[in-house]
């Protein structure tokens, strides 16, 4: 109906507005870039000192000093889906096979180099993550970098995700007339999932990478079925409704696996896992293997809730979808 189209367009406009308002300010981007370049300098020193230490310890197969270790950004800062609260993920690709102990040793040494060269930075070593990381806080400029020793897939995985986002921006931009359609959709999904508190891997939920794969899977399916050819009134609002409806009505976590290599759902390989979302660069790996049963039930509830909001409430869709779960306490 005309009434429904109006409110879908209103939601679309609000998603566009949130996207514009959530882009990092130029000053913050400059400070992030400055801190990133500083980390690059520290990694150069780390590579030199690590080679000397390894040589003194009599280590065999010494790292090649002529090949500089690659430092790169990955995740939301790389693919353009960053939120105001997002940290910058930085990977270090070293030129030798390394164990978790090597990663911890390298990061421990790097944390010392960072602190010695600039005492204004706060460095925190985190060992209980799947991959050990150091968090580098620039408190004065309110920016944080998460630095890790990258696995062999990290750089290529990030490049693949960027290529998919660029591809869908082009496809949906042409079909629906929406600039940066995929990027805006993913920024909203991240915002929605964080405000509804289902985007937190530390507490057994998906992380932002998991939701990125959810979004790309939906966009692959939507494109494969050419649904944008059936109706000419598509916008970001109606596309978001289809995203929620897709996972409520078509996805069965007990038998389906999410793999962005295909527009269809593949059969689940490991029924012991609550949810199976395959790493696009290493399909034997399930990036959601640590998602808990109760946590995924919560995630499913939020998808159902979103679909019901579209069915029951036409106005203020953005506010209703992204209503904070935090309970306000009157003073």
Image (cartoon, rainbow, N blue to C red):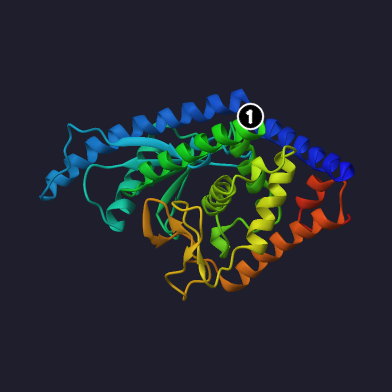
> Which residue is pictured at 48% across the width and 60% down the height?
277
Residue 307, percent from left and from top: 75, 58
Quadrant containing the N terminus in the rendered view: top right
Residue to which mark 1 is pinned: 179
Residue 271, percent from left and from top: 47, 75
Pick the front one: 166 or 328? 166
Quadrant containing the C terminus in the rendered view: bottom right
| Element type where label 1 sits in the image | loop
Q: Is residue 183 above or below residue 315?
A: above
On the image, which quarter does residue 90 sit in?
top left
> Which residue is pictured at 33% across the width and 53% down the height?
104
Q: Is residue 53 above or below residue 210?
A: above
> Which residue is pictured at 45% across the width and 37% down the height?
163
Is residue 323 visible in this depiction of the protein? no
Residue 293, percent from left and from top: 58, 73
Q: Is residue 37 above or below residue 229?
A: above
């Amino acid at each position: 109906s005309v009434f429904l189209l109006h409110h879908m367009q209103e939601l679309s406009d609000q998603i566009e507005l949130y996207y514009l308002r959530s882009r990092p300010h130029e000053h913050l981007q400059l400070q992030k870039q400055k801190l990133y370049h500083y980390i690059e300098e520290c990694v150069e020193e780390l590579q030199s000192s690590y080679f000397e230490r390894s040589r003194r310890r009599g280590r065999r197969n010494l790292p090649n000093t002529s090949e500089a270790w690659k430092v790169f950004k990955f995740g939301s800062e790389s693919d353009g889906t960053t939120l105001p609260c997002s940290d910058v993920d930085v990977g270090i690709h070293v030129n030798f096979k390394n164990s978790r102990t090597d990663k911890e040793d390298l990061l421990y040494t790097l944390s010392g180099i960072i602190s010695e060269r600039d005492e204004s930075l706060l460095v925190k070593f985190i060992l209980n993550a799947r991959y050990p990381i150091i968090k580098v806080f620039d408190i004065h400029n309110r920016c944080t970098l998460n630095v890790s020793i990258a696995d062999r897939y990290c750089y290529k995985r990030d490049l693949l995700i960027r290529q998919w986002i660029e591809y869908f921006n082009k496809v949906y931009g042409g079909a629906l007339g929406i600039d940066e359609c995929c990027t805006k959709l993913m920024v909203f999904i991240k915002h929605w999932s964080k405000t509804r508190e289902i985007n937190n891997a530390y507490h057994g939920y998906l992380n932002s990478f998991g939701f990125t794969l959810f979004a790309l899977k939906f966009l692959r399916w939507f494109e494969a079925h050419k649904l944008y050819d059936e109706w000419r009134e598509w916008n970001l609002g109606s596309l978001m409704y289809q995203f929620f409806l897709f996972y409520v009505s078509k996805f069965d976590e007990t038998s389906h696996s999410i793999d962005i290599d295909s527009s269809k759902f593949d059969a689940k390989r490991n029924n012991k896992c609550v949810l199976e979302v395959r790493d696009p660069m290493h399909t034997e790996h399930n990036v959601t293997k640590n998602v808990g049963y109760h946590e995924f039930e919560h995630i499913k509830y939020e998808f159902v809730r979103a679909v019901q909001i579209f069915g029951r409430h036409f106005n203020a869709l953005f506010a209703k979808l992204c209503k904070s779960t935090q309970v306000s306490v009157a003073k």
